Image (cartoon, grey):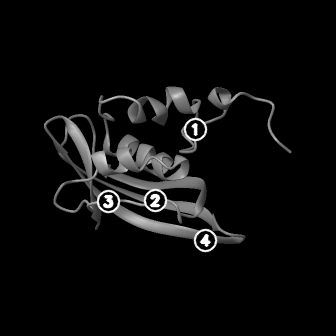
Amino acid sequence: MASNRPQSAKPCPCGYGPPYPECCGRWHQSTDPAPTAELLMRSRYTAFAVGDAAYLLRTWHPRTRPRTLDLSDSPRYTRLEVLETTGGSMFETEGRVRFAAHYLDGDRPGVLREHSTFVREHGHWLYVGPV
């Protein structure tokens, strides 16, 4: 059954709480950086969930970033669990976030678990890769 709530009133896929436009959508639609490593990780999860490859590439460290990113065969992400955050505050330059991203691949459920490394360069947090 479809929801009667407008898209803008639905909670953000990252699970943080506010609706998408007030949560991760604000980072996707602007050049303003997410202020912490955890918020960048949440916004990147949401970018996978909504199919925003441009945002993912823009927030990927140039050293590890792929040349292109095709999300057409991606699973459907259903829930994010942030399990641990180390560093990554507005006053640090490195951070790590351990998470579990739940998804459906067709009708088969799965979980992607990762402990990600982030660095802040020139005021912008960037995803480097798994620890």
Of callouts 3 and 1, which one flags the residue occurring earlier in the amino acid sequence?
Answer: 1
Instruction: Name which residue type carries label 4.
Output: Gly
* Mark 2 neighbour class, 10 Å CA radius: few under 14, some 14 to 19, many 20 or more: many
Alpha carbon separation for disc pair 1 and 2 = 17 Å
Q: Is residue 17 above or below residue 88?
A: above
Disc ID at residue 99? 2
In percent of width and height, residue 81 lies at: 54, 55
For disc 3, the marked residue is 68
In the rendered image, the quadrant that contains the N terminus is top right
Instruction: Name which residue type carries label 2.
Output: Phe
Secondary structure at badge 3 equals: loop
Residue ID at (33%, 35%):
34
Residue ID at (47%, 59%):
71
For disc 1, the marked residue is 12
* Mark 1 neighbour class, 10 Å CA radius: few under 14, some 14 to 19, many 20 or more: many
In this picture, residue 63 sits left or right of residue 89: left
Of callouts 4 and 1, which one flags the residue occurring earlier in the amino acid sequence?
Answer: 1
Of callouts 3 and 2, which one flags the residue occurring earlier in the amino acid sequence?
Answer: 3
In percent of width and height, residue 27 lies at: 39, 33
In this picture, residue 26 sits left or right of residue 1: left
Alpha carbon separation for disc pair 3 and 1 = 26 Å
Q: Do we see residue 116 in this rendering?
A: yes
Callout 1–callout 2 Cβ contact below 8 Å? no
Pair 3/4: label in front? 3
Q: Is residue 5 above or below residue 53?
A: above
Q: Residue furthest left?
A: 122
For disc 4, the marked residue is 110
Using the rendered view, name the quadrant where residue 76 is placed. Answer: bottom right
